[in-house]
Image (cartoon, rainbow, N blue to C red):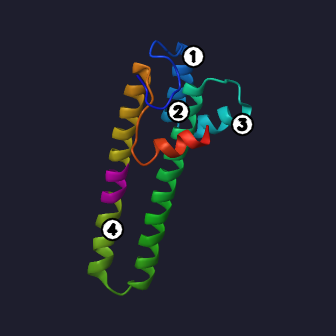
Amino acid sequence: MSQYLNQPASFQPTLKEKLLASLGYLSLGMFSFIFLILRQHDSRFALFHAYQSLVLGVLFLLLRVAFDTLLNVLAVFLYFSPPIIAFLGFIGPLFSSGLWFVMGLLLAYCLFTLWKGSETYIKWLSPQVERML
């Protein structure tokens, strides 16, 4: 079933746990932040997905801010080079759209595995989230 939860193979999360975890992914971690502050649920399944959606949301936000800042700094330093400014104007929305697309696919994968009743395994993220529990 799940390689992280120390639950028996017959473990099946409740509908409430699945809904709580889904809201976390759909809100890019904002709902998870509130959920973790209130700590209304003791389910390891819901907590795992809450932490993972929160970390994914923060990573997404940091990537967007870092790339937008880099584009703005380059635009300021290369102000007198119209071809480079045009290229930055093209590459910025392209990267942003690509980032949204990848994040959407990742969230769809997370939601799919969540509704199957298992944890979503993301190679570089899930072991770190497991340590947070």
Tell me residue 80's x, y (percent): 36, 87
Q: Between marks 4 and 2, how big is the CA–CA gap?
A: 36 Å
Secondary structure beneath dot 1 equals: helix
Q: Which residue is mark 3?
A: 37
Magenta-tinted stretch: 94-99
Image quadrant containing the C terminus? top right
Label located before the other in sequence (4 or 1): 1
- Pointer 4 or 2: first along the chain: 2
> Quick check: 113 left or right of 29?
left
Q: CA distance from mark 2 to mark 1?
A: 13 Å
- Residue 76, visible in the rendered structure: yes
First in sequence: mark 3 vs mark 1: 1
Q: CA distance from mark 4 to mark 1?
A: 44 Å
Q: Which residue is mark 1?
A: 16
**Near-viewer residue (81 or 5):** 5
- For the residue pair 118 and 54, the one nearer the viewer reads as 118
Most foreground residue, 90 or 125: 125
Nearer to us: label 2 or label 1: 2
Q: Position of residue 63 (x, y in %)?
A: 46, 58
Query: Relative to 125, is 70 above or below?
Result: below
Foreground mark, 3 or 4?
A: 3
* In the image, residue 12 above or below residue 72: above
